[in-house]
Image: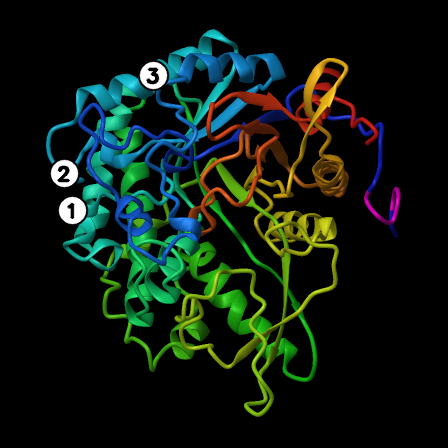
Amino acid sequence: MTIGTPDYRDAGLEFGEDFLFGSATASYQIEGAVREDGRGPSIWDTFSHTPGKVWNGDTGDTACDHYHRLDEDLDLMAGLGLEAYRFSIAWPRIQPTGRGVANEAGLAFYERLVDGLIARGIRPIATLYHWDLPQALEDEGGWANRETAYAFAEYARIVGERLGDRVAVWTTLNEPWCSAYLGYGSGAHAPGLMDGAKALAAVHHLNLAHGLAIAALREVATNDPGYSITLNLHVIRPSGEGGAEAARRIDGLANRVFLGPLLGDGYPADVIADTAEVTDWGFVRPGDTEIIAEPLDLLGVNYYSTVTVDMWNGVSPRVNADGHKDMGGTPWPGSEHVEFLEQPGPYTDMGWNIDPSGLEDLLVSLSERYPELPLMVTENGAAFPDVVVDGPEGPAVHDEQRTDYLRRHFTAAHRAMARGVDLRGYQVWSLMDNFEWGYGYSKRFGIVRVDYDSFERLPKDSAHWYAELIRTRRLPPA
């Protein structure tokens, strides 16, 4: 039985005082200053400077210039009333080659960020890895190399020793699915490889790195923080005669290959069988799954859209509308014969379908399977082609579509909580327009507009709407 409007356009819904409203960004997407203060090159520096990899040849060299505009951006967050800020730390700013002595200037920058958040009453949620692996580690095999997991643990320890008395929540990895499958399988993300065996090895070594990093953080943190990981779990809709089989396969590669080992169930036997022709999984060593299954205080959930799948008949042209940029490889090793069907609109500027019911379904299904594990929406938002207009009070961006998107997805989150989900907060993606990976600066996700010539920040109507939600703790109308 549906409670509320069928289209998820509710208003007046109330969120409790302990529900944490915030916004999120990632280091390479906003910081810039890639060659300053001792920062080393990352795989995204290399990838974005490789012709043909990123739209228009865009790079993160300058991005939003956040590195030089930190105080301005902190004041911007405070002005919106953010209660939390989910940011990521650039590993090559801390260890330019991914190993060795820490770079003091890098640590000092994040210390300023964390202290500035706390001074403004904003809780710091620190993500240790949002895809910017030091290039020197990639030169040694990157996430396909087991040694990278141990290097990551040492990096986590260094950051934890410096900030482990102030960070409220530590998130080890952001969307390891993307790091492994888009980076090493499809070629759409850095480092741009197309090797299914390496992609699956990367899955395991990312999982291993997570467990090792949490263990390291627990040894040095002194303020009783929460420990988490953020996953972009796929909401999969089966279709056609082969839909159930296709959904099982994609659920295994996208969801269960992470949830299983992270939450103590190990790697799913069916996924190992599905990928037997790709790899023998010899990279999993005795004791690894016990290391990975470090207790979690929180599971971060990133959600944007759904996928619809069927088994390909091998005759008609294969439809591959999985929402990811096609660079020639596949992010689905061992399941290349699954077909991703076109989905009904409307769509965001990324071509992703808008379906708030998918967020409700995802949160409820996770809660039913892991009832003792609190959840947080760590990313949700939408890209639309914004237009700046002159108004009576100056320039403005009337982004009705984004505001409507957020309203509908906050409604979905509220409905999930009404169904018993322990949802602790919601971090809107993104605080500001930024470098959108392979799409460069062509897609704008921010609730704050960034002029990439002047770097002026302009809160959009969606930002004002969100500020009202935070202030009143009631879902405003559009």
Q: Pointer 1: what residue?
A: 136
Q: Nearer the viewer, mark 1 or mark 2?
A: 1
Q: Nearer the viewer, mark 3 or mark 2?
A: 2
> Which quadrant is home to the C terminus?
top right
Give the labeled residue for mark 3. Answer: 165
Alpha-carbon span between mark 1 and mark 2:
9 Å
Q: Amino acid at mark 2?
A: Arg
Q: Is residue 355 left or right of residue 120?
A: right
State the image coordinates of residue 98 (x, y, percent, origin top left).
Answer: 18, 40
Residue 135 visible in the snapshot:
yes
In front here: 282 or 294? 282
Q: Is residue 117 left or right of residue 132?
A: right
Q: Earlier in the sequence, mark 1 or mark 2?
A: 2
Q: Is residue 264 visible?
A: no
Q: Which residue is mark 2?
A: 99
**Residue 39's quadrant in the figure?**
top left
